Image (cartoon, rainbow, N blue to C red):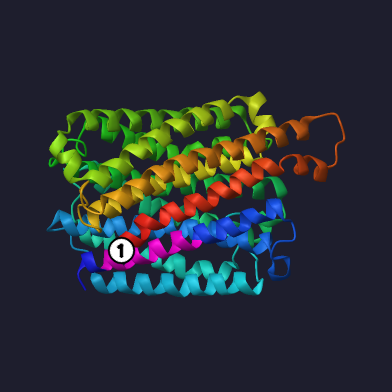
Amino acid sequence: MNTNTLARYFMVLALIMILSGLVFGVLASHAYLLPDFMKSSGGFARLRPMHVSAVLFWILLGATACVYAGLSRLGRPFAPTGKLGLIQFALWIIAIIGIFYCYFTGDIGGREYWKFPPQWAIPIAIAWVLMIVNYFKGIGSLKERPVYVWMWMTGVVFFLFIFLENYLWIFPYFRTHFISDMTIQWKVNGSLVGAWNQIIYGTSFFVMDRISGNKETGSSKAAFAMYFLGLFNLMFNWGHHVYTLPTSDYVRYVGYIVSMTEWIIFIKIIYTWRASLDTARKNYHYFPYRFLMASDFWVFFNLTQALLLSIPAINLYTHGTHITVAHAMGTTVGINTMILLAAFFELGGGNVRRDAHGKWLNISFWTIQVSLFVFLIALNIAGIKRGLWQMSSERIPFGEMMDTLAPVFAVFTGMGYILMLAMMVPVIYLL
């Protein structure tokens, strides 16, 4: 099996995961309006981990597809082994079937964002080991390689280390010490984002080079500056995830400063790259270009929100509210998903110009952006109200406070439906 075919397998599985994640997410949102929705089948307690796992797998499988598709286009000596990749793919299939079987039967035994029983992490870990072996067999020497080769390498190696760290809680030594256990769990979730961001941002640089027709972006000093900053980021940006735990202040501040700086550099790189493109290339690579530009907007949107959340007085109100959810979803859908869709159109879906399937893809593109914006605004409004309630001296019952948010949740759910339907158009096209 050649690497391009292997990439296609991972791409299809990733697209199935994002479709599943959208459906589970919309169903879970009904719990805010109808607390008894699907309660006999487990309701929100089952739908939420299904949604979260499906979206996480979309990112991980999509990133894997992009790495293999990218390597297949770089030519010799970039030649990963198809057999190892196929075993890796089979392990992912086994893990996904086992994990969702557990969810459907109510066997939920993991931790935040990884709620499945820990034994199903084993095939994922083995699959990732095979990917690391395959990657190093494929790239050969790292000398004079563009930045995305380094970013992919860093992402796949660090992800495995952090993923294993995520399961330290199975050992009593860590599980019985509450603060240490919580610190590790929150640290891991922040660092995992940094690891897959290395892969996804590396993919964005690769796509930029493909669209521009040269390797200037991927070999620029700014791109390598972002690589080293991103490396530091994935090791230390988790500081702001433990803001409410009794840890040293410098850990939190370093985490925020590094994270914000990385995004600012990413915006600068995209702005410089966009200015270098002529109209013909923008039209020929129309949808990859569009989705990259969308990710640029959402980076700015999330940067603004993150800067506000970095203020301790504000963080005290927002931590654990729907604002945290909005920030996570803005990053996952607005940044990571837009970059992955840009890469899928460029690497796996062919070059779709403005006049090719343009009408429905164009409508869906703008519908995704607008519905996501309203969706996130609704979540932020709900988070503000809940934060004020949490810190209020008045003892208003939780149920009464939630009842006042019903109109906001109605908008949130409605936008979720629109976002799901709009996202189906490019996803089904790419399938």
Q: Which residue is mark 1?
A: 133
Given the image, on which type of amino acid does mark 1 rest?
A: Val
Q: Is residue 293 left or right of residue 28?
A: left
Q: Is residue 90 magenta?
A: no
Q: Is residue 431 left or right of residue 111?
A: left
Specify whether residue 152 is in view: no
Q: Is residue 7 magenta?
A: yes
- Where residue 226 appears, as percent x and y from the top left, is 33, 34
Residue drawn at 68 percent across, 30 percent down: 316
Label 1: state its secondary structure: helix
Q: Which residue is nearer to you in this view: 412 or 225?
A: 412
- Where residue 45 appears, as percent x and y from the top left, is 68, 61
Report the span colored magenta.
Answer: 6-20
Q: Which residue is nearer to you in this view: 36 or 248?
A: 36
Q: Please name the predominant secondary structure of the magenta segment in the image.
A: helix
Residue drawn at 25 percent across, 48 percent down: 149
Q: Is residue 279 above or below residue 127?
A: above
- Where residue 385 appears, as percent x and y from the top left, is 71, 34
Outermost residue, front side: 359
Q: Looking at the figure, which quarter contains the N terminus?
A: bottom left
